[in-house]
Image: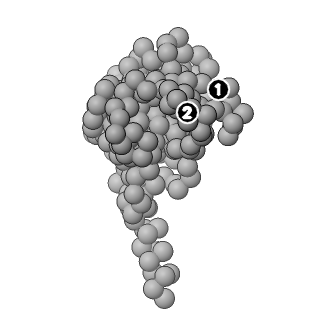
């Protein structure tokens, strides 16, 4: 909804202006690497694909703000990433990862192709989106799992779930938690802030789960 788009924009703008903050991004909560093994799968088809236009596939999906890829150091391989103009008033667009290209476009250029979100998995309306860019893979579900095909939508077009806020900052965790909580209270005091952590802690937690699994398997 447009009000959540405004929320995402205002949150990014306020945090970017805070001392010590180098960059800010917003994404759906399912787009936090190493946080969990829960996937956000969508069903889709390729309407441009002639005889197989109605054939359905699935891939992991997330919605992110324009600065997400740069903040997480995900390289742009082809095309472009999102801008502030990719909002509810613009044409629906998606960015895909390299694993998506390897699986679905091994011999084709994916830029300009269309993906149709059939909506059958979640009762949504059918939506067509144009592929505008290809980015590098990220190990979303742990360092021990190979990257899988992923679609990224613009959170300014698909902001209907819980937000996760990403900050690259020189401040410590306590200061950062206070900053995010205070900023959110200024925007909407009824929205809670929880789960503030560092990327190092998320990676350590992911590795700890792997070590536990290996220990259990070896006993």
Q: Which of these two is toward me, 206 or 177?
A: 206
Callout 1 crowding tier (Cα within 10 Å): few <14, some 14–19, many ≥20: few
Disc 2/disc 1 C-alpha distance (Å): 19 Å
The x, y position of residue 50, in whole percent, is 52, 29
The x, y position of residue 94, in whole percent, is 45, 28
Above or below: residue 115 compared with residue 210: above
First in sequence, mark 2 or 1: give its number.
2
- Write down the residue under mark 1: 126
Q: Which of these two is toward me, 91 or 52?
A: 52
The x, y position of residue 203, in whole percent, is 38, 57
Quarter occupied by the N terminus: top right
Mark 2 or 1, closer to the camera: 2
Q: Is residue 73 left or right of residue 28?
A: left
Q: Residue at x 54, y 15 (%)?
A: 88
Q: Is residue 151 visible?
A: yes
The numbered mark at residue 51 is 2
Helix, strand or loop at label 2? It is helix
Q: Residue at x 50, y 26 (%)?
A: 48
Q: Residue furthest front?
A: 51
Q: Residue at x 45, y 85 (%)?
A: 218
Which quarter of the figure has residue 177? top left
Callout 2 crowding tier (Cα within 10 Å): few <14, some 14–19, many ≥20: few
Q: Residue furthest bottom?
A: 219
């Amino acid at each position: 909804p447009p009000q959540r788009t405004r929320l995402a924009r205002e949150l990014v703008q306020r945090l970017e202006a805070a001392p010590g903050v180098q960059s800010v991004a917003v994404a759906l909560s399912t787009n936090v690497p190493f946080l969990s093994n829960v996937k956000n799968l969508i069903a889709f088809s390729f309407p441009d694909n002639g005889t197989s236009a109605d054939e359905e596939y699935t891939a992991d999906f997330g919605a992110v703000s324009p600065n997400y890829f740069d903040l997480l150091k995900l390289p742009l391989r082809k095309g472009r990433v999102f801008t502030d103009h990719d909002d509810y008033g613009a044409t629906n667009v998606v960015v895909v990862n390299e694993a998506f290209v390897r699986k679905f476009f091994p011999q084709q250029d994916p830029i300009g192709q269309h993906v149709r979100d059939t909506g059958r998995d979640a009762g949504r309306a059918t939506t067509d989106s144009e592929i505008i860019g290809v980015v590098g893979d990220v190990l979303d579900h742990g360092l021990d799992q190979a990257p899988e095909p992923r679609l990224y939508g613009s959170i300014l077009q698909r902001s209907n779930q819980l937000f996760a806020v990403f900050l690259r900052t020189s401040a410590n965790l306590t200061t950062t938690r206070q900053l995010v909580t205070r900023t959110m209270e200024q925007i909407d005091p009824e929205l809670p802030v929880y789960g503030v952590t560092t990327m190092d802690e998320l990676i350590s937690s992911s590795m700890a789960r792997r070590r536990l699994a290996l220990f259990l398997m070896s006993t």
